[in-house]
Image (tube, helix red, strand yellow):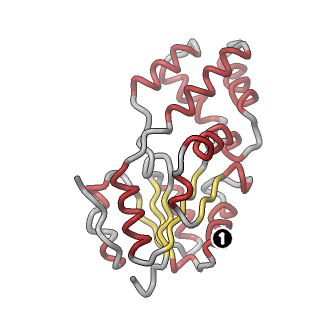
């Protein structure tokens, strides 16, 4: 095990979980009566508040409706919530294999994710994903969302480690920069192939490429 890095912290969406397919996004946009471009604008406009737990699912979609000049029924909103959860359920199994290899090698691992309660509850109730990590830090539970420092500090506290003793992988550069500001080693993650070689520089087992 590396003398400097003692834990690896992984983002969920875009790292552990594959991003939604374009067709999934198009279909939900169509259900909302919006173009894909407009849908994505509104989808992300209120997302941090939703992930942080400032908005519940109904309020999130009602905010989108108000901004888009739309009106949605409770039944439509329930459908939108269910579709949104489905966006984030396709796991990248080789990354989970790597997580298991890291733990076998003596490293702690953590999930650090901006995630609404609807998705967090679904994963806890319908999968054993979170049990495969030493620490799970979710934005709605700690009421802080990346790139705010609080969510990173909560994860480090639960790991019992300093920032410089951890490595963080996230697909968004602004989240990487926020981690680095706290002394956390960080790598912008795009694909396993692009990651290959960067992780071993920290003494970590190699990530599966195929």
Of residues 180 and 189, the one nearer the viewer is 189
Q: Locate residue 181: give its quadrant.
A: bottom right
Q: Residue at x 37, y 67 (%)?
A: 101
Q: Residue at x 27, y 59 (%)?
A: 208
Secondary structure category for the residue under label 1? helix
**Residue 67 % position (x, y):** 69, 22
Establish if 32 lies above or below 21: above
**Location of residue 120 in the rendering, given as x and y in whole percent from the top left corner:** 63, 45
Please tell me whether residue 199 is drawn above or below residue 151 in the rendered image: below
Q: Which is more toward the observer, 126 or 113?
A: 126
The quarter in which the N terminus is drawn is: bottom left
Q: Which residue does the numbered mark 1 point to in the structure image?
A: 158
| Residue 82 image offset from top left, x and y in percent | 59, 27
Q: Quadrant of residue 125?
A: top right
Q: Is residue 117 left or right of residue 170?
A: right
Say which of 54 and 210 sits in front: 210
The x, y position of residue 188, in whole percent, is 41, 59
Circle 1 Cα neighbour tier, 10 Å, few/some/many (<14 / 14–19 / ≥20) = few
């Amino acid at each position: 095990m590396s003398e400097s890095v003692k834990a690896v912290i992984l983002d969920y969406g875009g790292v552990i979980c594959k991003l939604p397919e374009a067709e999934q996004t198009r279909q939900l946009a169509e259900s909302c009566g919006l173009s894909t471009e407009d849908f994505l604008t509104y989808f992300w406009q209120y997302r941090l508040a939703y992930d942080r737990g400032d908005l519940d699912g109904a309020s999130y979609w009602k905010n989108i409706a108000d901004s888009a000049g739309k009106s949605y029924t409770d039944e439509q909103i329930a459908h939108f919530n269910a579709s949104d959860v489905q966006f984030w359920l396709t796991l990248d199994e080789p990354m989970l294999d790597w997580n298991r290899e890291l733990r076998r090698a003596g490293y702690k691992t953590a999930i650090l994710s901006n995630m609404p309660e609807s998705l967090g509850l679904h994963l806890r109730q319908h999968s054993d994903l979170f049990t495969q990590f030493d620490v799970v830090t979710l934005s709605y539970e700690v009421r802080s969302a990346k790139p705010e420092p609080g969510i990173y500090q909560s994860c480090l506290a639960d790991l019992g480690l300093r920032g410089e003793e951890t490595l963080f992988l996230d697909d968004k550069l602004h989240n990487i920069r926020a981690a680095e500001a706290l002394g956390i080693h960080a790598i912008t993650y795009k694909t396993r192939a692009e990651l290959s070689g960067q992780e071993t520089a920290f003494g970590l087992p190699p990530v599966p490429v195929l």
